[in-house]
Image (cartoon, grey):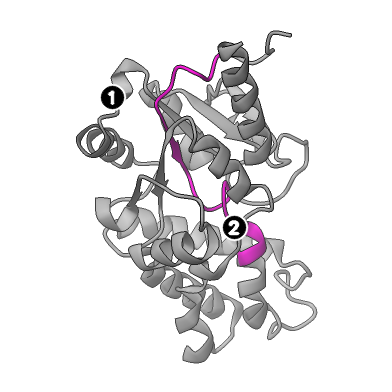
Amino acid sequence: MPSSYPDLTGFKALSFDCYGTLIEWEAGMLKSLQPLVSQLPASHPLKADPPIAAMQRLEEIATAHETRTPGLPYNELLVMSISELAHEAGIALSDSISEPFGNAVGTWGPFPDTVAGLQKLAKHYKLIILSNVDNANMAATREKQLSPAHFDAAYTAQDIGSYKPSHQNFQYLFGHAKKDLGIDWQKGELLHVAHSLRVDHVPAKELNLRSVWISRGKEKSGFKGIGGDWEKYKDVTAFEWRFTSIGEFADEVERQFAAKKS
């Protein structure tokens, strides 16, 4: 039976957003915020379990820092951001909480479908990461969280000197994918795979980069989290495929390549 999805077999490489797409970003962030939130009085508006509002406010603060100080590595930026959040909340946050927070990202685990899905996809494409984190967290994630899945390259905000959704990050991806791996995005050889609408799919549309949305439930009305609400971003994105998970995406890729061989 022919697939109901557009053809996925013509691409030579996939570029991935990592955190939120492959790694359980929100679950990790919510856990890492607990030492701060636990110190808030019960009446505080950020006091909740899980601390969604605190996570969203931290994301706003971090995004502002990304714009103002694009060359600052993400682990340092996170320390600044949680310290600012604590100050806003009237909490004197100790270094024993704020300092480890910056490197907590590398300890957050993958979604259950991620590693097996990546291993399937690696049979058909070169795999690249394009991430807003720093090199230390990226190295820890690749070694401890995504292994044994293999990536052919990983490009970080620290390498680039700016943060997505800046077009500079994607231009860096295009140039290095061609130089390092022989992948020419202008020939339609690169497909971008990401969860975040705001930092990935909006610039993908602006640059005419074909993309896959790994929605992970955010297509549902009223979903609260980070990465962009579907209702807000639906008119400024143009992804051609939507899957709920990397596993579902990988299964469709397998089906299409198998059908092509038969």
Check the image and report above or below for 38 versus 202: below
The residue depicted at 43 percent of the width and 22 percent of the height is 11
Image location (x, y in percent) of residue 22: 57, 49
Q: Main secondary structure of the magenta part?
A: loop
- Residue type marked 2: Trp
The earlier-in-sequence mark between 2 and 1 is 2
Label 1 sits on residue:
184
Answer with the quarter of the image where residue 24 lies: bottom right
Image location (x, y in percent) of residue 105: 51, 67
- Direction from residue 261 to residue 11 in the image, left or right: left
Between 161 and 136, the residue placed more toward the observer is 136
Quadrant location of the C terminus? top right
Write down the region rendered in magenta.
7-28
Q: Is residue 13 magenta?
A: yes
- Direction from residue 67 to residue 27 in the image, left or right: right
How packed mark 1 is, by other alpha carbons closer than 10 Å (few <14, some 14-19, many 20 or more), is some
Let me know if residue 195 appears in the view: no
The label on residue 25 is: 2
Q: Is residue 202 magenta?
A: no
**Disc 2 secondary structure class:** helix
How packed mark 2 is, by other alpha carbons closer than 10 Å (few <14, some 14-19, many 20 or more), is some
Image location (x, y in percent) of residue 191: 44, 27
**Disc 1 secondary structure class:** loop
Between 46 and 177, the residue placed more toward the observer is 177
Q: CA distance from mark 2 to mark 1?
A: 30 Å
